[in-house]
Amino acid sequence: MKKTVSLILTASIAASVSVSGCETKSGNQLIMATNATFPPYEYLDENGDLIGIDIEIGRAIAEKLGKELVIRDVKFDDVIDGVEDNSFDFGMAALTVSEDRKAKVSFSDTYAKGIQVVIVKADSEYSSFKEFYNGFDSDGIPTGVKGEIKIGVQKETTGDSYSSDTLINWGFGKENVKRFDSGEAAVEALLSDDVTAVIIDDEPAKAFLKSHEGLKILDGAYADEDYAVIVSKEDNELLGRINNAIKELRESGILDKIIGKYIQ
């Protein structure tokens, strides 16, 4: 599956950005948490500056709200935990809407869509993730996972959640999943034959193929998902203002412009 994004030009967006740990929130600032290991959504350029789809959309939201944006680059699982305990105003880290996460934080309206894909080595014998299973029942549900299969994922991501799920939900079981601190570490494990495949969002997967030789993406999506901003469940006012900003950015074409800058 390929994403199709229209390109609509609009004015540039400016806001201040810093990279460090938590800090006390201020009335004139919005503190956004991210995890800059997930191109093209959030990552560091050759100068060590934060760039990416979420970074630019976060800036645009802050501008709409008349606030100075401060970005904190933290561990992925600290993004959700930090928003939940009000260390950060909001979080953007290619975060997929899920029921488990809804128990901790509130989600904005969707600003982008993604899919989970499967990366394997270029000479892999597998052509579909369905070949990782050793059989299916009469309803087409997997009945088991082949003994040699090990799936690499970035921990606490939806790739982790989906892969670790039970067979009835097309998971592979926790015992067949290796969890890493970053997508990069999972890909390195794949190249070292420590895992059979890596399950990750499609655009980061494409970026990893460009930066690492000897990999390919299997045909077909493993899962479809929606990306949204997270805020504290206690902050309904901010959630409403962010939703209004997303609506305005979509209607003005700015969302398309930002996404189109990174995804063709």
Image (cartoon, helix red, strand yellow):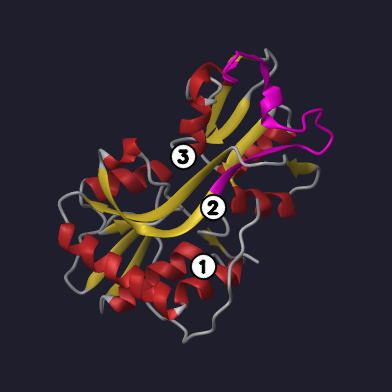
Query: For the residue marked with disc 2, what is the amino acid?
Result: Phe
Over which residues does the magenta segment extend? 115-142
The answer to whether residue 57 is visible is: yes
The answer to whether residue 16 is visible is: no
> Which residue is tagged 1?
49
Mark 1 and mark 3 in contact? Answer it, CB < 8 Å. no
Number of numbered labels in the structure image: 3
* Magenta-colored stretch includes residue 187: no
Q: Position of residue 250 (x, y in %)?
A: 42, 72
- Judging from the image, what secondary structure is the residue with disc 3 in? loop
Mark positioned earlier in the residue sequence (1 or 3): 1
Residue at screen point 20% across, 74% down: 28
- Classify 135 as above or below 23: above
* Magenta-colored stretch includes residue 120: yes
Q: Position of residue 81 (x, y in %)?
A: 29, 43
Q: Which mark lies nearer to you, 1 or 3? A: 3
Looking at the rendering, which quadrant does residue 30 occupy?
bottom left
Q: Is residue 69 left or right of residue 42?
A: left
Query: For the residue marked with disc 3, what is the amino acid?
Result: Thr
Q: Is residue 15 left or right of residue 23?
A: right
> Which residue is tagged 2?
38
> Which residue is tagged 3?
157
Dot 2: few (<14), some (14–19), or many (≥20) neighbours within 10 Å? Answer: many
Q: CA distance from mark 2 to mark 3?
A: 11 Å
> From this viewpoint, which residue is outermost toward the front?
138
